[in-house]
Amino acid sequence: MQALVRLRRFVSCVVICAALSGCTGISRGIAEAVLDRKVEDTRQCQMQGPKFTGLRQSLAQHSDGTIGATKVLMVHGISHHTTGYSNRFRDRLVAALDLDIVDPEVKTIQLVAPDLAKEADGSEPDLGTLRVTRHASRDGKRSLLFYELTWSAITEKEKKLILYDTANTEGLGRSGINHTLKGFMNATVPDLLIYMGSGHAKITAAVRESVCWMFSNDWRGLPSQEGRHACHDWQKTDLASIALDDYFFVTHSLGSRITLDTLQSFATDSGSALAGSRLESIRGIVRQKDFTVFMLANQLPLLQMGRAEAKVTGQYHAYCTASGERQQERILRRLNIVALSDPNDILSYPVQDDFAQQHIDSRVCPRLANVSINVAQQRDILGAASFADPLTAHNGYLEDPRVISLITDGTGDTESAGPAQGKCQWQEVRRTHRTDNR
């Protein structure tokens, strides 16, 4: 009996350590080979919120191929990312949308923002890389521009200060598992600390520049040669299509907080990438636009702690309704936020119903849908306990077909299908209308 107890403890420890250290393959291998050879998929998905549309509906509106475009910006979270990190996710997305043609050219822009202070050597701050790819249907009637932002370069310089600790060349040696865990912490936690401190201006500037490039130009107007370019200084900048294009964001982990902070900054920051003589006309157009943000591994409640509250909160009706007395002061017509979290992700948090009203600037007109989804499969450990790989729970969204379906189709067009093709239980939030005289 004691031997069985020790075996259970050993297996549990190995699985947990493997998951926390980032060894997804090891943890999956143990789970499949030792714990459960045949596991029924019991993962659930529950959603509460209003209706929202996805990429497919946007593409259908632009199906004549001449009016407007569908644009998607991907923003990553903590840990080092290299350009191309979103390729597999992007390919799943366009495959689900039947966009089988890809342009052979990739537009690559090294981001700069002239309004930021120069580096000590007099150079413009390096804000990372924006890669743009173009995808189309075989009949040429539907097309999508996919923008991938890689901002890791902003934090890499400061993170070099603790590389010696990851290498563990000083003091006593470190055990193998602890060495891996410490390396994981050193690669991820500093990104959060830097963003909350000295890196905030640069990282949000990278998103502002990316949004500006989404607003400006068509595919042909984007820079063809790789180089450092500022959006509003680009000689071919043309903002005429803002009113016609649709804008979607897919953010992961810390990327959600970064993107929300950037969008909120448009309410007060006249020195953003949108600044210039046409700023007011641009704002007038954007004021009539809907943006949709899919926040994967959402962390908004955690990252709200210790932060100053938004300038204007609790005034949704004044800014965001047709009869609102301050509707001309809003920034967007609506910001649809779809916050996805796995309860087994130790770095993800569900969003309470009143979070948007209390903590998000009313001028961006937030409308929130909260999705609780099992991305990681929960498994039984020899009858002693249940376990779900926390790394898969944090990073597995980009491979989950239900998540892909929510992004492509939203809540669906029919009552029978429902969101995620009927694989996500949906409690719709909307005002009810009485049919009696009470």
Image (cartoon, helix red, strand yellow):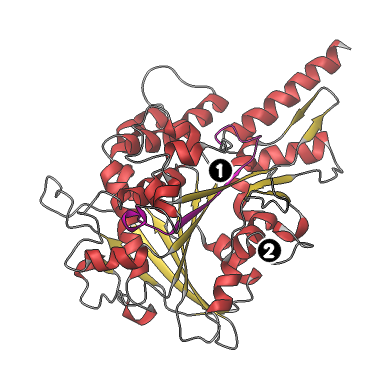
Q: Which residue is mark 1?
A: 297
Q: Is residue 283 above or below residue 433?
A: below
Q: Is residue 365 above or below residue 311?
A: below
Classify 10 Å Cα crowding around label 1: few (below 14), some (14-19), many (20 and above): many
Three-letter code for the amino acid on which mark 2 is drawn? Gly
Q: Is residue 120 above or below residue 284?
A: above
Q: Which mark's residue is nearer the viewer, 2 or 1?
A: 2
Magenta stretch bounds: 326-348
Residue 305 appears at what percent x and percent y?
A: 42, 28
Can residue 357 be seen here? Answer: yes
Q: Which residue is mark 2?
A: 412
Can residue 229 be seen here? Answer: no
Check the picture and name the quadrant holding the C terminus.
top right
Please, what secondary structure does the residue beneath circle 1 have?
A: loop
Locate residue 245: give its quadrant: bottom left
| Residue 340 placement, left or right of 376 | left
Residue at x-position 70% and y-position 57%: 419
Three-letter code for the amino acid on which mark 1 is drawn? Ala
Locate residue 206: give its quadrant: bottom left
Which residue extends farthest top?
2
Residue 82 appears at what percent x and percent y?
A: 43, 54
Q: How many marks?
A: 2
Q: Is residue 337 magenta?
A: yes
Residue 275 appears at what percent x and percent y?
A: 21, 61
Q: Is residue 34 magenta?
A: no
Q: Earlier in the sequence, mark 2 or mark 1?
A: 1
